[in-house]
Image (spheres, rainbow, N blue to C red):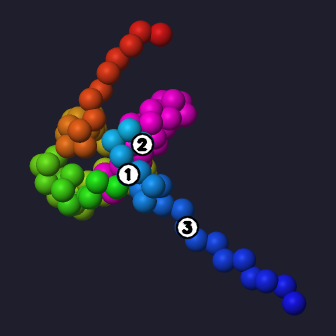
Amino acid sequence: MSKKIVLEDYDVAEHLRTPQEMAAYLDACIEESDGDAAFIAKALGDIARAQGMSKVARDAGLSRESLYKALSGERSPDFATILKVTRALGVKLHATMM
């Protein structure tokens, strides 16, 4: 008799508990994105879900529905939306020269 293997969906948002974990996750996603804005938006969406979408939407001045759409990873949100979301998440953007 063989055992059944049950697989569960992995939700990274459930594992982002501290600001340090969120920052490390976002850094890794930016590094791996190869310039894919939708991929980075999805990472921001994961962090927003970890912090609470309703709170992030309110702090960003967006509806929950538009925030979910913008950070779904299915499209690239405009830069103004990214700036609103990063501010609401408490993310400080930092630039360095390569």
Mark 2 burial class by Cα count in 10 Å: few <14, some 14-19, many 20+: few
- Residue at mark 3 to residue at mark 1: CA–CA distance: 18 Å
Residue drawn at 42 percent across, 42 percent down: 21
In the rendered view, would you say 98 is above or below 68?
above
Picture coordinates of residue 76, whole percent (x, y): 37, 42
Left or right: where 44 falls relative to 92? right
The disc at residue 93 is: none
As rendered, which of 78 and 42 lies closer to the eye?
42
In the rendered view, would you say 43 is above or below 54?
above
Q: Quadrant of residue 52?
A: bottom left
Find the magenta span and give its range: 22-49
As rendered, which of 8 and 98 lies closer to the eye?
8
Q: Are marks 3 and 1 in contact (CB under 8 Å)?
A: no
Q: Quick check: can you spot residue 90?
A: yes
Residue under label 1: 17
Residue under label 2: 21
Q: Residue furthest right?
A: 1
Question: Between tags 2 and 3, which lies in front?
Answer: 2
Q: Amino acid at mark 1?
A: Arg
Left or right: where 28 falls relative to 59? right
Q: Amino acid at mark 3?
A: Asp
Question: Between tags 3 and 1, which lies in front?
Answer: 1
Picture coordinates of residue 93, whole percent (x, y): 30, 26
Q: Are marks 2 and 3 in contact (CB under 8 Å)?
A: no
If you read the primary sequence from the N terminus, does the residue marked by circle 2 or circle 3 appear first?
Answer: 3
Quadrant including the N terminus = bottom right
Q: Are marks 2 and 1 in contact (CB under 8 Å)?
A: yes
Q: Amino acid at mark 2?
A: Glu
Residue drawn at 46 percent across, 40 percent down: 25
Residue drawn at 75 percent across, 82 percent down: 4
If you read the primary sequence from the N terminus, does the residue marked by circle 3 or circle 1 appear first?
Answer: 3
Picture coordinates of residue 31, whole percent (x, y): 51, 30
